[in-house]
Image (spheres, rainbow, N blue to C red):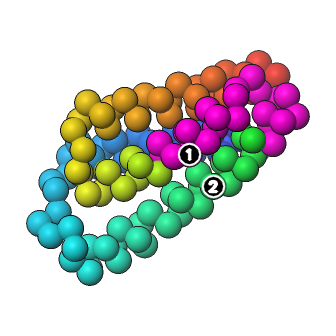
Amino acid sequence: MLFNLTDKVQQARLQLKQRYLTNDKPDNKKDRDFFNMVKNETEPLFELIGKWEELALKAVKDREIAVHPQQVQSTRENFELIILHSYYIDIKQKRYMELHQAIDYVCQMIIDTLAKKY
């Protein structure tokens, strides 16, 4: 279950990166229609990362994966940041890529650990 969710997080991360790189900044960040569109499109992503964090923290507690709980929490926070920055495009690309790579690092550690076990 955690393996599959981590894979979904990775896929979503790549889709968000593509959105960040190919879309333009919104004309008006305070536009109600834009806000509602972002809210509707990102709600499943926030749910996904919430479920992922819950399962990952349980796996850490049960010593199924060798990741620190702080890394799991930071990954959730970083993922939530790239969700929003992928739509609002309001940070420099260097910072976006740092968040992107940090998520990838932790997710890849979890995938590699779980792949060896099963």
Quarter of the image for residue 117 reads: top right
Task: List the residue tagged with mark 1.
Answer: 76
Quarter of the image for residue 38 reads: bottom left
Task: List the residue tagged with mark 2.
Answer: 50
* Numbered label attached to residue 17: none
Q: Residue at x 41, y 71 (%)?
A: 39
Location of residue 40 in the rendering, given as x and y in whole percent from the top left corner: 43, 72
Q: Residue furthest right?
A: 62
- Relative to 58, is 50 above or below? below
Q: Which residues are magenta?
A: 58-79
Q: Residue furthest left?
A: 27
Instruction: Give the crowd class for mark 1: few <14, some 14-19, many >=20 residues within 10 Å.
Output: some
Q: Residue at x 68, y 54 (%)?
A: 51
Work out how far the residue at label 1 is from the one at label 2, CA to CA, in angstroms. 7 Å
Magenta stretch, main secondary structure, is helix
Tag 1 near tag 2, CB within 8 Å: yes
